[in-house]
Amino acid sequence: MADDNKLKQELLYMASITSKYDFTRMEVVEGILRLENERRILDSVFGRRFKTRIFDIAAGVKIDDTCVLCGQHADNRVICNHCMETILGSDYAKNKIKNKQTKRFKLPTIDFSKFKLPEIKLSKVKIPEIKLPKLEFLKTEEIPDNRKNSVKIFQYAAVICLTLILFMQIWLLAIAFSLPSYNPTVEAKVSDNEPVAVSDIEAAKLQLQKDFPEDQGYTITFAREDTDYAGRFLVDRGDCCLEVEEQLSDEERYDYFFTEPIFIFYISYNEDDAGKVGMAEVNHTGSILVMGSFNDGRRTDSFYRYR
Ligand SMILES: [Zn+2]
């Protein structure tokens, strides 16, 4: 097929040249042959015969005027009319001409593509928009330094704050641990002395002085004679009277609230940097209640069975 197409191309080339050019002019024939030397189109037997013929015509050599293709008489002294019509009227020739025309029509389309250059310029106008993100990228490249600084500042501030908080927690913890040493909770103090019946103020005061002696810094002052609830003196030693009273039933409380005469004394204790003030009640059997400041977690206004 390639050879067939090559021959068809060759024949069409010869026919079209024959129809266009005047072979009696040597400069025309020389131009065709020079081009032929470059392109090498006319390689077949017909082509070589064609080249020889047109050169002979240009050179004025006497020739037989027969068709180089079929050998019949040719009016133009190269290719007869029948061969010309056959070649130029063939489907191959028509396709070639069409292709040439479409190629020519395609050239303007190439020109149109050249007219599209302004559109490329429009896209160039769009390039600044593309540069904007680049500027943003530059900003993002610059921002990390600022952010790094701000992040570092924030980190330092956070470290300082957290360290301060840690020190404050340690300080509060130390205070919490040291507080019991300032005001330690102690066991309820209970007298070692057994109750001895008392008949008057002086006897009652002597009983108190056994537990709060003057030579240890206690001062006992008589306040008054009074009546108080007998039940207070019936609770276990070391218990708080008021706390027991709250837990009694109504029937128990009725028996509990019988009154009896008591002696009431104030007890004070003074050191260089500390003072204690309390109140003591002594009944006729020698039992003692004290009311004052207790640091064992009981209410400070509670009576406390001492002995
Ligand atoms: Zn012919």
Image: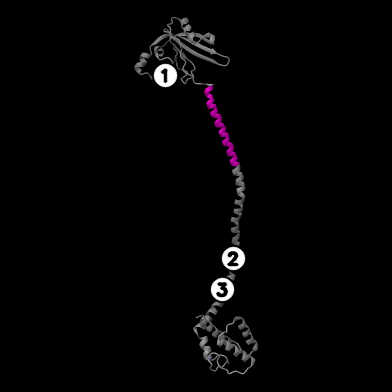
Q: Secondary structure at mark 3?
A: helix
Task: Tell me which numbered mark, 3 or 2, is placed earlier along the sequence.
Answer: 3
The quadrant of the image that shows the C terminus is top left
> Main SS type for the magenta part?
helix
Residue 120's disc is 2
Picture coordinates of residue 221 (x, y %)?
Answer: 51, 9
Q: Image quadrant of residue 263?
A: top left
Q: Position of residue 165 (x, y in %)?
A: 56, 34
Q: Are marks 2 and 1 in contact (CB under 8 Å)?
A: no
Reply yes or no: does residue 185 show up in magenta. Answer: no
Picture quadrant where residue 117 is located:
bottom right
Q: What's the amino acid at mark 3?
A: Thr
Looking at the rendered structure, the kind of residue marked 2 is Ile
Query: Mark 3 near mark 1, Cβ–Cβ under 8 Å?
Result: no
Span of residues in magenta:
153-181
Is residue 259 left or right of 169 when viewed as pictured?
left
Tell me which residue sits at (61%, 51%) in the image.
141
Label 1 CA crowd tier, 10 Å (few <14, some 14–19, many 20+): some
Which residue carries the number 1 mark? 243
- Which label number is shown at residue 109? 3
